[in-house]
Amino acid sequence: MKDNIVIVGGGIAGMEAARQLLLLGYKPILVEKSDHLGGHVADWHCLFPDMTPAQDVVKGLVEQIKDANIFLETEVSFINRMKMGYNVMFSNGVNVICKAILLATGFDLFEASRKEEYGYGIYDQVMTNRDLERWFNTGDDKRITGKDIKKIGFVHCVGSRDVKAGNQQCSKVCCITAIKQAMEMKERFPDAEVYCFYMDLRLFGKKYEDFYIKAQMESGVHFIRGRVSEVSENMQGQVIIKTEDTLSGKPAKITLDLLVLMAGIVCNKQAVQTASMVQVQTDSDGFLKSKDNILNIIETGSKGVFLAGTATGAKTIPETAAEARAAALAIHNYLVAQS
Amino acid sequence: MIYQGKQKIWSDYQKEIPDNHWFYVRSCIRQSFFPASERYFLNICRDLLGKDIYETEHHTTCGGIAYHSDTIPQETAMTIVARQFALMKEAGYKNLVTSCITSFGNYTEILETWREFPELEARIRENLWKACRREFDKPEYLAHASDLVYKFRHEIASKAKYNLVDHMTGEPLRVVEHIGCHYSKMFPHKGVGGAEYPCVLSGMVDSWGGQVIDYPERRHCCGFGFRQYLVKANRGYSIANTHKKFESMEPYHPDMIITNCPGCPYFLDRWQYVISEMEGKTYGRNGYGIPVFTYEEVAGLVLGFDPWDLGLQMHQVAVEPLLEKMGVPYNPKTKYLGLNGKEIMKPGLPTVLKCC
């Protein structure tokens, strides 16, 4: 049991925390339900604001945590509270007694088909931000490959800031992701008109505003402030969107060859189940509840259980990594105090 | 178009519709616009399918038009509806089926409001007691009459004499389905198939052999829209909306339109005449319009009832080309004969829109 630490989740937060714990002299046990490390970022192509290849980031972290005990395709079956720690049973049959648990369980991408009016899964030429990243990586998607794409639309805030969808929170990264993807599409289809339909542009991060200006000045992306109300399909299989340009005060109807829905970040439902095993509750936004949301965001009400990354809400990769480092240090301090 | 995607959504919006024993409330305006539709709903359900559908002459309007026109407060509309529920209770029924889409929307909205604000329901109970010494139970099930026809669509298909197919070629008829806005746009889970891709009418069309057309302005309002038409100065909006729909569906060459709202078939039918007079444009083949039907009329045609008994002579757009395409026999000489063989007078012919 001595200084065993279980990290649940092999995304950026889990890997960065594992890396820091290794540097601090621990040998953490990391469990990941999928067959690879990297979480959602592993599916991404390039990362804003410097267009860093996502694979470089993931591979760099994987390389640095190879000394950790890593179980892929493994889930937490149950956790029992003990006097001095926790007994954790994994789905692969391995049983671990540990002093600390880090929940780095990440997020789910909003299921875009739930916004029925946008026609994802109904109309051929509608895709999500994740589908587009996959196409950037593979070049294989019948919605784009081999097609003459002349007009592309990006809908921001799909399932974010949306009371009816049950997600009132901002997903934080969609605005800048939409701008990034719009610019990437403009590079691949220089003759195409590219539109971003947004409620507000929340460009708070380092170089984000530069990115936005570049999208307008150099790439010629059109930014229309208004929500898309409905999507339909014409005889040619193009999508027709109805929206409102709230700045000019006019309704608009635009025919597009491709519509990309910026599906937002929502809580990982499976994580809620795991968290309940260690009496970690969910907050009003559905994400895991921290001890408090100012100085103790990585701590929970349960002794020896810590949180990192998007398990507690939408975050950028740098924020996630910083939080993971803080969680690693908090775990170290906790274990020192225990001993 | 990914048909499986629609099927997935439909599976999320299935509605429990009891098989029998319904208290039926009629529409204020359908008996004027499409006089045989309600009668044939009752005939089909009672005589053909053997269902128990009860109605009483004591029921009134639901107040929906007045409510949506802002001429009565919501509490008044609620008390009117509470009285209908009291009549249902007195007759010994627990399931209520409405003929009108706006009534269905009105009843649904009221029941949902009472669920959210029970104190309001208590006040309405008091209002009803003070007004007419009646007490009510809320219905266990609320349905629109098109829900019932949707539920019985396979039984109707099994008794069909004609299908929604071109009898010469065997090709399915191309059918536009238009759902009344108050059916499920307010409460998607109360309608069969939800709000975005409802299947209450498309399910009937599929079962009876037709092919549903999904055109870009499928969701758009028919043009009635209450304020668009009830306020005379706004009627340009009404016809503009209808025009938008017809322009959108025109390239798909629809054979017919099926609707489930009192206003929609009326406006989609009559405005075709007005558009033809204003613009010189018609949307059907060879100068005809696109015939517009209620779902009861379509069920009646499929079941082999006489087109003039179904009231199809009251349509502005001629239905004869469609009857011929379906192979439904009709007698042109009896088109304008009323009950007892009396002449009911022939309408004047439009300038542009071809009529029989």
Image: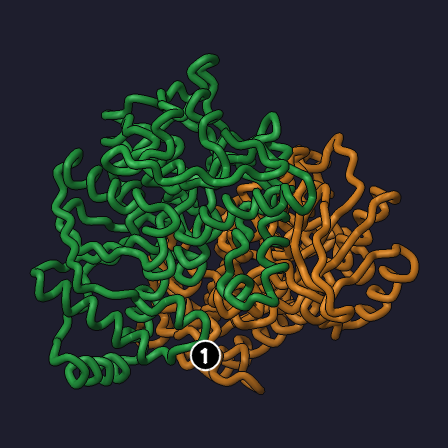
Secondary structure at badge 1 equals loop
In the rendering, at what x and y percent does residue A174 appear? 67, 62
**Image colouring:** by chain
Considering depth in this image, is A197 or B64 the residue closer to the camera?
B64
Q: Which residue is mark 1?
A: A300
Considering depth in this image, is A150 or A269 the residue closer to the camera?
A150
Considering depth in this image, is A144 or A53 the residue closer to the camera?
A144
Considering depth in this image, is B34 or A19 the residue closer to the camera?
B34
Confirm whether residue A28 shows in the render. no
Residue occupying the far top of the picture: B168
- Note the chain letter of the orange one: A
Instruction: Quadrant for the N terminus of chain B, please.
Output: top right
- Note the chain letter of the green one: B
In the rendering, at what x and y percent does residue B240 appear? 63, 54
Q: Is residue B160 above or below residue B290?
A: above
Q: Chain of mark 1?
A: A
